[in-house]
Amino acid sequence: MRRAGPARRKAKGRKKVPRASNTTGRRTSAGLSGNLARPFRWTSRGALQRPTHSHSTSNARGSHPFFPDTSGSPSHLSANHTQLACVRVGHRLLVRLTSPTPYERSSQPFNRFNRPTIGDRQRAHTCTMSAIELINPRAESVRRTQALQVNTAGAIGLAQVVRSNLGPRGTIKMLVDGSGNLKMTKDGKVLLTEMQIQNPTAAMIARTAVAQDEQCGDGTTSVVLLVGELLKQAERYIQEGVHPRVISEGFDLAKTGALDFLEKFKKSPDMDRATLVKVATTSLSTKLHSKLATQLAADIVDAVLAIKPATTTTIEAPKPTADGSSESVSEWNIKDPIDLHMVEIMKMQHKTDTDTQLVRGLVLDHGARHADMPKRVENAYVLTLNVSLEYEKTEVNSGFFYSSAEQREKLVESERRFVDAKLKKIVELKQAVCDAPTEGSNEKKKNFVIFNQKGIDPMSLDILAKNGILALRRAKRRNMERLQLCCGGVAQNSVDDLSPDVLGYAGLVYEHTLGEEKYTFVEECRDPKSVTILIKGPNAHTMTQIQDAVRDGLRSVKNAIEDATLIAGGGAFEIAASNHLTTTVKKAAKGRAKLGVQAFADAMLVIPKTLAANSGFDVQDALVALQDEVAEGNVVGLDVQTGEPMDPVSLGIWDNYRVKRHMLHSSAVIASNLLSVDEILRAGRSSLKSEAPMG
């Protein structure tokens, strides 16, 4: 209750001044002379009492929603900044705007984040906000140094997760989903895709690494490691007072220098089968054991070479020959793409992983639907159809009534007349090509096989079986396209114009039964342009791991053929690039940009360091040995078996050129963008909703 004294009765006719309070709920007081305003607290009698000075933080809050802007100068208030002062005179509360004195601007202690200590009660009267807090006081944001720490912590944390997977000696991660299903893999893309990443910085880096895999097929783990190391090295210089923009400029110079060095470092060996097998072996060895990697490498190379289009063109050379005529030379046109979708990857849970094989044809995951059809045919003509060979109901509901069995037979015959006409034409084509007399008596018997994308009813299957035709229905559309590439021929949407010219050929078609599953193999095709890699294994975990490795191996061989260049592996490029940046690019840089170049050069060493650590060797000893060899002008990488420097070119350890190029570009860009972040805000309208008042 307030006292109704004479002063209060006297002020009835005057204009009331509203009470003002700061955000923390404490009323403050300042002298009219403009000196340092000290906080006061109200007593039970309504009097002001000056508290004693104490720097104890027992009453200070753990976090304050309003932090002063500390950019530029150590003082927390600018010269033209005004503050709110509340003065209690008698029983009235006066509000005035005052400017801080020089003493106030120069005597504020700061914490390690260059912000005023919140626990100091001498500054309880000041209240400055960030821009987002002026708009929405309940907004969640992290600013300046804390934003950099959040980004760095997220990048380093994600790098620590995938660090142990790099290289042939890397470990395997086990992923368990909500329903308890397991997945064992060391593929970077699978890990970053399947893991639940909540940190926004780590999620952005993961998306960048996944894009790397989609573009190049490899290098996801390297991108994550390089981005994390770049931010880690940049944080060292920023803590010493270097501006993040200076580090970003150094990163740009280092990226340009590293890309230029990559063009000089690449090799252009003959892209024969032996070289491609070494490329595939290098890729597979990082995900599978050495025996299986060596076996699958040859199958992967044969698969890619089988589907590779004719990329050689003949041109007229301007150089004349001895007789005066121009000679034609053969030139490789690498612009023709290789479609890896023409390599079907089929999984069969059977035997062991070493039984995985390449089928120069097609494997379908279903078989014939009639018991009397042949299970194995040789020297077969293949007809691919997209024609319905079953009775289809009309769109209009109708009924038929019959009073005798003869009428029912006529009704069924009329319904079957349309389908039987189609079957008759197919049987006539089969008889024309298979029953025709042959000149040689030793020629194998010709057979007939039908692959139909649509359905075939039981009565139609019975007619085809009586004529010795093997028919498969409901074939997948992608298999219909591959059948034409394997066996030749032309798919038909109608049976009206059937002729021997639309037929393909397969030397062997047979059905394989495994438990309750049936598989149909189409093999011995003439120059197949689509093949199948049949993955076998004792369980689903093994087959999935092999499938991920095979896909990366296919992409590595494809990249090698299209680029026609390779990069020495085993960390050889990273060691050489770091040495080039330190000795050449850093000297050419001007000013403090040298620091960014040095940070980039140090970050490049994370790849050989991780290879040495995962292989069980001392990191510093291995790194010093590699740097000594590079200083002498040798191209060396790390031997994961011995921990000593080795020549990757002579051993056939190759990396893809486009993988390294994309890794350098994307890592530098994402690191520079993260360094430029000075505030992290929670986006969306959820923060603008009114919250329930706290009781």
Image (cartoon, rainbow, N blue to C red):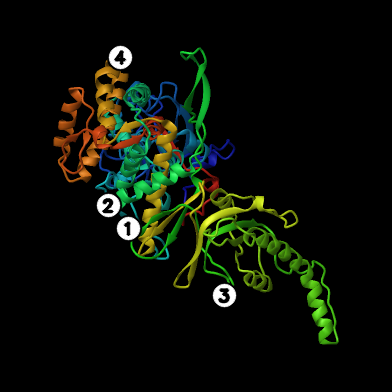
| Observer-nearest of 695 and 326 | 326
Disc 3 target residue: 371
Disc 2 target residue: 291
Residue mark closest to the camera, 4 vs 2: 2
- Which amino acid lies under the numbered mark 2 shown in the image of this protein? Lys
Residue 232 visible, this orientation: yes
Question: Alpha carbon of mark 4 to alpha carbon of mark 2: how far?
Answer: 48 Å
Would residue 651 appear left or right of 307 to someone viewing this image?
Answer: left
Give coordinates of residue 531: x percent, y percent. Answer: 48, 50
Q: Secondary structure at mark 2?
A: helix
Query: Crowding near pointer 4: few (<14 within 10 Å), some, many (20+)?
Result: few
Are the residues flagged by discs 4 and 1 in contact, CB closer than 8 Å?
no
Question: Alpha carbon of mark 3 to alpha carbon of mark 1: how far?
Answer: 33 Å
Disc 4 target residue: 588
Of the numbered discs 4 and 2, the one sitting upstream in the chain is: 2
Give coordinates of residue 662: x percent, y percent. Answer: 41, 33
Residue mark closest to the camera, 2 vs 3: 3
Disc 1 target residue: 354
- Which amino acid lies under the numbered mark 1 shown in the image of this protein? Thr
